[in-house]
Image (tube, helix red, strand yellow):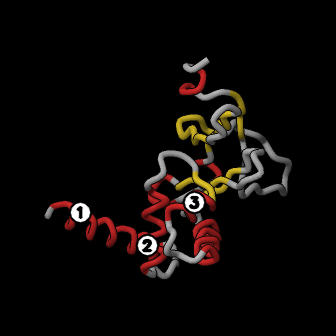
């Protein structure tokens, strides 16, 4: 019984968050956001499609675009050829001062958000206003390095 109440409470929280960001909280958008929240690290469009088999692929893609535009998620180009996404921390707020480093494991092909490692400060010339910074280190993650 508590689980049901918790799920309803969480759904209301997601609806309120989406509304506060100017996103209409349709049942499909709420469901997609909940699935996104379930990923420990980054996820791809394919990951979402595989976990949301009853949702049209174009709906998932359009929802990703809306969530990116409203700064609920951020994108990472990790060089794998597949765009990765990650939930924004701080109650759905991705801003330049909250950007963090990412790590791409060349062994298991996963990309990790390193929330505790802020993107190094770069002084841009006057007039340059960055809206996104993509900082990706590549190598082997701890799990894969233990297998070597």
115 versus 76 height, above or below: above
Q: Earlier in the sequence, mark 3 or mark 1?
A: 1
Q: Earlier in the sequence, mark 2 or mark 1?
A: 1
Q: Which mark is residue 57?
A: none
Tell me if 74 is positioned left or right of 20 in this view. Answer: right
Which residue position is annotated with label 1?
Answer: 6
Residue 53 image point, x, y percent: 51, 69
Q: What secondary structure is marked by label 3?
A: strand
Q: Residues within 10 Å of mark 3 (few under 14, many from 20)?
A: many
Which residue position is annotated with label 2?
Answer: 30
Compare residues 87 and 61 and report the one nearer the observer: 61
User: Which quadrant is the N terminus positioned in?
Assistant: bottom left
Q: What secondary structure is marked by label 2?
A: helix
Q: Quadrant of residue 100?
A: top right
Q: Residue at x 48, y 51 (%)?
A: 39
Asked whether the residues under the numbered discs 2 and 1 touch, taking CB atoms below 8 Å apart as contact, a structural biologist would say no
Q: What secondary structure is marked by label 1?
A: helix
Q: How far apart in space, not on screen, are marks 2 and 1 (Cα)? A: 15 Å
Which residue position is annotated with label 3?
Answer: 73
Q: Quadrant of residue 79?
A: top right
Q: Nearer the viewer, mark 2 or mark 3?
A: 2
Q: How far apart in space, not on screen, are marks 2 and 3 (Cα)? A: 14 Å
132 versus 9 height, above or below: above
Q: Residue at x 49, y 82 (%)?
A: 24
Q: Residue at x 59, y 35 (%)?
A: 117
Q: Residue at x 52, y 75 (%)?
A: 55
96 versus 140 height, above or below: below
Q: How far apart in space, not on screen, are marks 3 and 1 (Cα)? A: 23 Å
């Amino acid at each position: 019984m508590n689980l049901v109440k918790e799920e309803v409470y969480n759904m209301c929280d997601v609806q309120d968050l989406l509304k506060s960001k100017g996103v209409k909280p349709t049942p499909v958008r709420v469901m997609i956001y909940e699935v996104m929240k379930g990923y420990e690290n980054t996820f791809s469009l394919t990951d979402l499609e595989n976990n949301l088999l009853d949702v049209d692929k174009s709906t998932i893609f359009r929802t990703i675009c809306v969530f990116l535009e409203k700064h609920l998620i951020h994108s990472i180009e990790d060089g794998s050829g597949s765009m990765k996404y990650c939930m924004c921390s701080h109650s759905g707020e991705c801003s330049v001062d909250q950007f963090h480093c990412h790590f791409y494991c060349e062994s298991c092909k996963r990309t990790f958000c390193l929330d505790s490692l802020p993107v190094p400060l770069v002084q841009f010339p006057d007039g340059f206003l960055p809206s996104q910074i993509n900082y990706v280190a590549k190598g082997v993650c701890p799990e894969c390095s233990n297998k070597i």
